[in-house]
Image (tube, grey):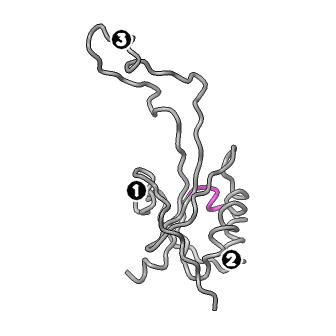
Amino acid sequence: MDQWATVLFTDESWFSLNTDSCRTFIWREPGTRYLPSNVCEIDHYGGGGLMVWAGIMLDGQTPLHVFERGTVTGVRYRDEILEPYVRLLAPEFILMDGNARPHRALLVDEFLESEDIRRMDWPARYPYLNPIEHVWGGQFQLETPLREPSRK
């Protein structure tokens, strides 16, 4: 338990406003096709969504970060995530991020090294061992504030 208490588990996730299959199935009684409860509006233009990032630890979490439009790159990961959130927790926590390309960019490695941020070694293609992956599927509540790291 003591070892896991020093790990900051992080991840990004995309939340779409559409269903995954682009189809909504409705079971209805015969003759009720046009009742308002059986009519669904359809967005033919993608509907949109948003990419978010968060981190959890044994006794709290980071704020939820919503990425503005565009792709998450190594530069954005460093500037929008590592600099404002993760750097504040170093050196008390070990960073556990995924193996996504932005996480493994050379400029990200250089930033982590320059800030003395330790990163947990993690095998490729094992995201479901990261407990935050299970948070995205449930209700994400930000009720417990992130504890401030002590400075020595």
Reading the image, the residue beneath label 1 is 134
Q: Is disc 3 placed on a helix, strand or loop?
A: loop
Q: Which badge, 1 or 3, comes first in the chain's sequence? A: 3
What residue is shown at x 66% (from left), y 80% (from top)?
A: 116
What residue is shown at x 53% (from left), y 35% (from top)?
A: 17
What residue is shown at x 67% (from left), y 69% (from top)?
A: 109
Which quarter of the figure has residue 89? Answer: bottom right
- Residue 88 in the image: x percent, y percent? 65, 75
Q: Is residue 76 magenta?
A: no
Find the distance from the CA under tag 1 to the CA under tag 3.
Answer: 37 Å
- Horizontal side, residue 152 vs residue 31: left or right: right
Marks 2 and 3: CB-CB under 8 Å?
no
Reading the image, the residue beneath label 2 is 113
In this rendering, the count of numbered labels is 3
- Identify which amino acid the numbered label 2 is placed on: Glu
Q: Which residues are magenta?
A: 100-105
- Identify which amino acid the numbered label 3 is placed on: Arg
